């Protein structure tokens, strides 16, 4: 069994197009490494300050610290072993209908002596929910979360005023819960077949439930289900964060080891920028770091300083791994390069000379394949307005006019020249990442 490879995308500062580069390169990495549902790839959003991947996959409500069973990036890096144990399925599955019995039972215990009208209203609401969710089961760890969500059922939640935990969950999730229940009711009363209703309900549940395991985002890459998994950031998290210390480093190394055991082919992380602790950590552990930089003075000077500082870390890491001298740890990647005019060409010549100076100063570990106008990531006009994985259908909410405008980017033949140049460079980047690891 091959070892799972760890790749990180990094930049000295924000604005380099790092996350867009990661997404587009991942599409080609899937083919380059022959990844599949049997040999999947794990994407991790490790940019805690600007969680780009989490927003791109529309997951800002999925990763939360509000339920013990749920996961997010910081929880993984601080307690990776329990998060990954048993594939995140604890015990047997449970019927959702049981959740409403638990909610109603808890209400009765908390509200002994309540008036008959309130009791009947709570009972009728729960019975209605049980009818709508009949025959649907969830893994046990998701069931534990759903039992607490069931408490948000209007009548029961409002009645159980003595239960502080219920109120906390209810206040935060009430709007989402009510929209979710309404959607389930619409499906339940539709003219679809029983089989179609069940499938639609399961899809609605999957979209609504907070994450208790890695999410499947394969559809964004036009890949078979199970090929690409994702762990995102809790954007409202205030607890212990990723630390630049031995504990977080041990956790990340354990993650890679566990991923190998589960037959993952690669772990790809979107790093924090600059000197964020996640950036320092990923430079210690990753097999290959793709360092994105725009060809501007700020980016060039900042990147030069960073790799003077990170140089010793990378050299020690190469010695520990006994990495072949032909395989480089850092790929220096100029991005959003404009060469549309004579003035652009003059600036490009000066900037690329300075970028190559960085690569030459650290030639032991920097790959300079892209430090030229031919191979760099050229500016794509589309990306100024709309991030997209070139060569795949766009799955974000677009109106019909937008869909017509963006359709040309779904196939290589119909792409404009700037997108074709970038597409070819992303493909080459995936190849160099694989070769260097």
Image: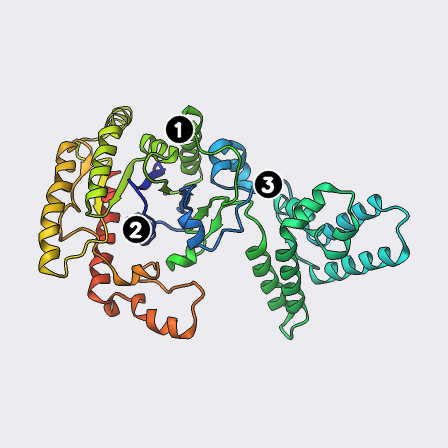
* Disc 3 packing (10 Å; few <14; some 14–19; many ≥20): many
Task: Name the residue nearer the viewer: 247 or 2.
Answer: 247
Q: State how far apart marks 2 and 3 are (Cα).
A: 33 Å
* Residue 244 image label: 1
The quadrant of the rendering that contains the C terminus is: top left
Q: Is residue 192 visible?
A: yes
* Disc 1 packing (10 Å; few <14; some 14–19; many ≥20): some
Residue 206 appears at what percent x and percent y? 56, 55
Q: Helix, strand or loop at disc 3?
A: loop
* Image position of 72 with respect to 325: above or below: below
Q: State how far apart marks 1 and 3 are (Cα).
A: 25 Å
Residue 378 appears at what percent x and percent y? 20, 56
At horizontal 88% and vertical 50% (from top left) the residue drawn is 114
* Residue 17 image label: 2
Residue 169 appears at what percent x and percent y? 66, 46
At horizontal 90% and vertical 54% (from top left) the residue drawn is 115
Marks 1, 3: nearer the viewer: 1
Residue 268 horizontal side relative to residue 146, left or right: left
- Say which label, 2 or 3, has the lower sequence index: 2
Q: State how far apart marks 1 and 2 are (Cα).
A: 25 Å
* Image position of 275 with respect to 344: above or below: above
Question: Residue under circle 3?
Answer: 69
- Say which label, 1 or 3, has the lower sequence index: 3
Marks 2, 3: nearer the viewer: 2
At horizontal 35% and vertical 61% (from top left) the residue drawn is 386
């Amino acid at each position: 069994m091959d070892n799972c490879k760890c790749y990180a995308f990094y930049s000295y500062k924000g604005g380099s197009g790092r996350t867009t580069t990661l997404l587009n390169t991942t599409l080609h990495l899937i083919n380059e490494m022959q990844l599949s549902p049997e040999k999947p790839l794990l994407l991790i959003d490790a940019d805690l300050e600007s969680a780009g991947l989490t927003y791109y996959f529309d997951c800002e409500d999925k990763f939360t610290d509000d339920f013990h069973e749920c996961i997010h990036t910081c929880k993984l890096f601080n307690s990776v072993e329990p998060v990954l144990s048993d594939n995140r399925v604890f015990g047997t599955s449970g019927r959702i209908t049981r959740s409403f019995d638990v909610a109603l039972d808890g209400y009765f215990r908390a509200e002994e002596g309540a008036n008959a009208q309130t009791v009947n209203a709570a009972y009728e609401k729960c019975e209605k929910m049980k009818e709508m969710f009949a025959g649907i089961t969830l893994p046990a760890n998701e069931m534990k979360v759903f039992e607490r969500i069931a408490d948000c059922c209007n009548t029961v939640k409002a009645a159980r005023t003595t239960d502080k935990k219920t109120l906390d969950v209810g206040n935060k999730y009430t709007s989402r819960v009510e929209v979710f229940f309404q959607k389930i009711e619409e499906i339940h009363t539709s003219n679809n077949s029983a089989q179609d209703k069940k499938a639609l309900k399961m899809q609605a549940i999957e979209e609504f439930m907070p994450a208790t395991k890695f999410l499947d985002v394969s559809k964004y890459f036009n890949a078979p289900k199970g090929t690409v998994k994702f762990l995102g950031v809790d954007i409202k998290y205030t607890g212990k964060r990723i630390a630049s210390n031995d504990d977080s480093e041990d956790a990340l190394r354990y993650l890679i080891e566990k991923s190998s055991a589960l037959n993952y082919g690669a772990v790809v992380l979107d790093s924090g920028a600059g000197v964020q602790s996640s950036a320092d950590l990923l430079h210690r552990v990753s097999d290959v770091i793709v360092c994105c930089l725009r060809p501007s003075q700020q980016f060039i000077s900042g990147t030069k300083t960073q790799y003077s500082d990170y140089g010793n870390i990378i050299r020690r890491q190469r010695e520990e791994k006994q990495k072949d001298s032909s395989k480089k740890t850092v790929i220096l990647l100029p991005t959003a390069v404009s060469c549309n005019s004579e003035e652009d060409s003059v600036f490009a010549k000066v900037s690329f000379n300075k970028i190559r100076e960085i690569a030459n100063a650290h030639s032991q570990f920097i790959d300079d394949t892209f430090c030229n106008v031919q191979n760099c990531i050229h500016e794509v006009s589309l990306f100024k307005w709309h991030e997209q994985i070139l060569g795949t259908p766009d799955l974000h909410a677009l109106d019909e006019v937008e869909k017509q405008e963006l359709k040309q980017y779904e196939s290589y033949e119909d792409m404009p020249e700037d997108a074709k140049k970038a597409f070819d460079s992303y493909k080459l980047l995936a190849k160099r990442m694989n070769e260097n690891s």
